[in-house]
Amino acid sequence: MSVHNETALAVLEGLKALKQKIPNLVIPVTKDERKRLSAAASVPAEFVERLAVAVETTPRLVRAQALRPDESRDLMSYAEAFGPVADEIEALAGFLRHSVTAARNKAGAEALTTYALAQRLAARPDHADLAPHVADMRRALGPKGLGAKGRRAKAKAEPSEPPAQPPVTTTAPAAPATPTPTTQK
């Protein structure tokens, strides 16, 4: 196991522990559940506070199954406190994705540069011993130098059969709407 694998496992364990520290953590049941919640979730905090005051001072507004005003205030306080935490975690995830891509890019660029050098050297008789290595590298790189993801993306981009051409029809030019006057001499 590499040092990076050990570090990644430690970070994952830390994230699991962090998840346990976050109160009221709700895991969505469907992928579009957040959209369903967004209309009522976008109500301003001031509106919720004014409603809480109205419910506290007007008994007619109290509903049997409704949240108590202190519960509503607590939920809004939670949202205000943990919104920035979610923003920071999302930013960190973006930075980590970029770091992963940058690491792959650096290693890949070096590998491609060395591969190009090996190809040039293997073409020379005094470095013919490199030819089997170049062949192995070529196989590992895949057709036309694309990795497996690139081949799948390219296959999706290329249609399996060319699009049908609309039928070509030829028509004679239309006759002029009004006769052209002619002059006789």
Image (tube, rainbow, N blue to C red):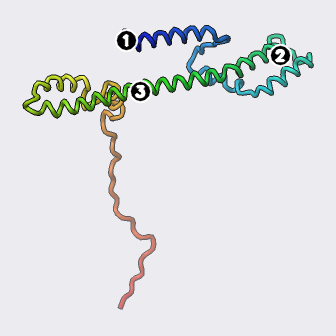
Q: Quadrant of the N terminus?
A: top left
Q: Which residue is mark 1?
A: 2
The percent position of residue 168, horizontal first and vertical second, equals 32, 51
Residue type at mark 2 is Pro
Answer left or right for 105 relative to 45.
Answer: left
The quarter of the image holding the C terminus is: bottom left
Dot 2, how many residues are within 10 Å of its Cα: few (below 14), some (14-19), or many (20+)? some
Which of the two labelled residues, at mark 1 and mark 2, occupies the earlier sequence position? 1
The image position of residue 41, as x and y in percent, is 70, 24
In the depicted structure, whether residue 183 falls above or below residue 80: below
Residue 61 shown left or right of residue 14 in the figure: right
Find the residue positioned furthest to the bottom: 185
Please name the residue shown 33% across and 35% down the image: 158
Which disc number belongs to residue 101? 3
Disc 1 + disc 2, Cβ < 8 Å: no
Q: Report, in whole angstroms, how far the alpha carbon at label 1 lies from the one at label 3.
A: 19 Å
Q: Residue at x 24, y 29 (%)?
A: 114
